[in-house]
Amino acid sequence: MELPTNYELLSSSERRTARGQYVKLQEGLCYWCRAPLDGPPADGEKRKSIRRDLFPSNFFKHPIHLQHCHKTGMTEGAVHAHCNAVMWQYYGR
């Protein structure tokens, strides 16, 4: 799959594939906080409080998310679920 790609046009299996490709391209590091995706987010992000009521009930079910731009729909990288929430709640991304 060629990256970036339009998130909104991808099936769930294609999203999994894109997320896996980004994990490899990013050498296992979170696009946002640069901490390893198989561990917790970086301390600075981890300390940011998240209002869980702002997110769908299953939002935190998967630890690694495929981040995409909400304006263009284009994928940006793989992120911790917490970092994805920080990006949206604090920065509108």
Image (tube, grey):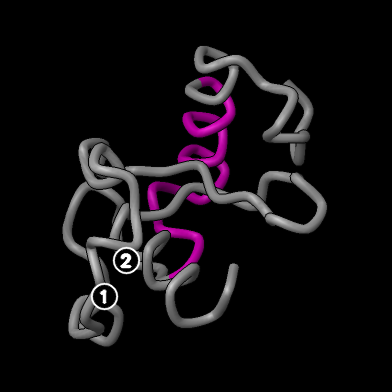
At 70% from the left and 32% from the top, the residue drawn is: 8
Q: Which of the 4 quarters of the picture holds residue 59?
A: top left
Q: In which quarter of the image is the C terminus?
A: bottom right
Where in the figure is residue 9, as x and y percent of width and height? 74, 24
Q: In which quarter of the image is the N terminus?
A: top right
The residue that mark 2 highlights is 35
Which residue is nearer to you in this view: 14 or 39?
A: 14
* Residue type, mark 2 in image: Ala
Q: In this view, does 78 lie to the left or right of 51?
A: right
Crowd tier of the residue under label 2, counting other residues whose Cα lies within 10 Å: few below 14, some 14–19, many 20 or above: some
Q: Give the range drawn in magenta.
A: 17-32
SS type, badge 2 = loop
The residue that mark 1 highlights is 42
For the residues labelled 2 and 1, the Cα–Cα distance comes to: 5 Å
**Is residue 71 found inside the magenta-colored segment of the image?**
no
Q: Which of the 4 quarters of the picture holds residue 51?
A: bottom left
Q: Are discs 2 and 1 less than 8 Å apart at CB?
A: yes
Where in the figure is residue 15, as x and y percent of width and height? 55, 25
